[in-house]
Amino acid sequence: MPDGPTITRLTPAALPAAAPGLAALLLDAVDDGASVGFTSSLTSAEAEAWWRSLAADLADERVILWAAHDGGRLIGTVQLRLETSANGRHRAEIAKLLVHRAARGRGSARRLLATAEAFASASGRTLLMLDTQTGSAAERLYRTSGWSTLGTLPDYAADPSGTLRPTTFFHKSLPVAGG
């Protein structure tokens, strides 16, 4: 991956074919202890069904989904969840930034994050939010990518083993598109 991964936006039509690879990526993250909303009992079928359940949100553009590929292999993903309420259309949330363990340390997560941030800014979003397990490698990524800590909540989410862990919340202000 000399120039980094190829990052593409996944459409609702592409989701069924991508779902097995996305499921494998999610299972790898959960197996590695990532607190991303699932427990260690997650099965491949459940993970695939979860990804497929995003189709309507992708079609309505409430969620924008990107995939990173190294050659033909899916190695990462990130979601941008767009707020649709009338008083919140200036903000969005970064979610499920996942990079396969075998592909970490080569800038894929940083490129996925930058892609989502650029899209958000171009779409008129000026405020991004996200949360991650306190002390995780992801927390270090966000700190070094210009994100500001909002605060930490103890026992906010369980890790895959069911142990409650603290979560750090971050925000980032984006420039006004065209400004």
Image: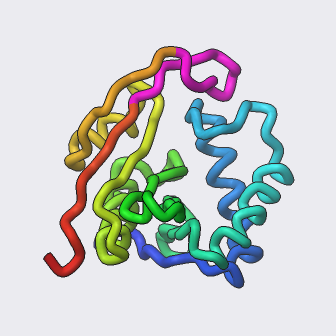
* Color style of the picture: rainbow
Quarter of the view holding residue 63: bottom right
- Decide if residue 115 is on the left or right side of residue 39: left
Question: Front-most of 48 and 53?
Answer: 53
Q: Is residue 157 magenta?
A: yes
**On the rendered image, what quadrant is the C terminus found in?**
bottom left
Magenta highlight on residue 70: no
Above or below, 117 relative to 152: below
Where residue 172 appears, as percent x and y from the top left, is 27, 50
Residue at horizontal 41 percent and vertical 30 percent from the top: 136
Q: Position of residue 52 (x, y in %)?
A: 76, 65
In the image, residue 178 sits, relative to residue 49, either above or below, namely below
Q: Is residue 92 above or below residue 120?
A: above
Q: Residue furthest bottom?
A: 13
Asked if residue 39 shows in the view, the reply is: yes
| Magenta-drawn segment | 155-168
Q: Quadrant of the N terminus?
A: bottom left
Q: Main secondary structure of the magenta part?
A: strand
In x, y percent, where is residue 138?
A: 39, 39
Residue visible at 58% across and 33% down in the picture: 35
The residue lying at 25 percent from left, 44 percent from top is 147
Residue occupying image coordinates x 20% and y 47%? 146
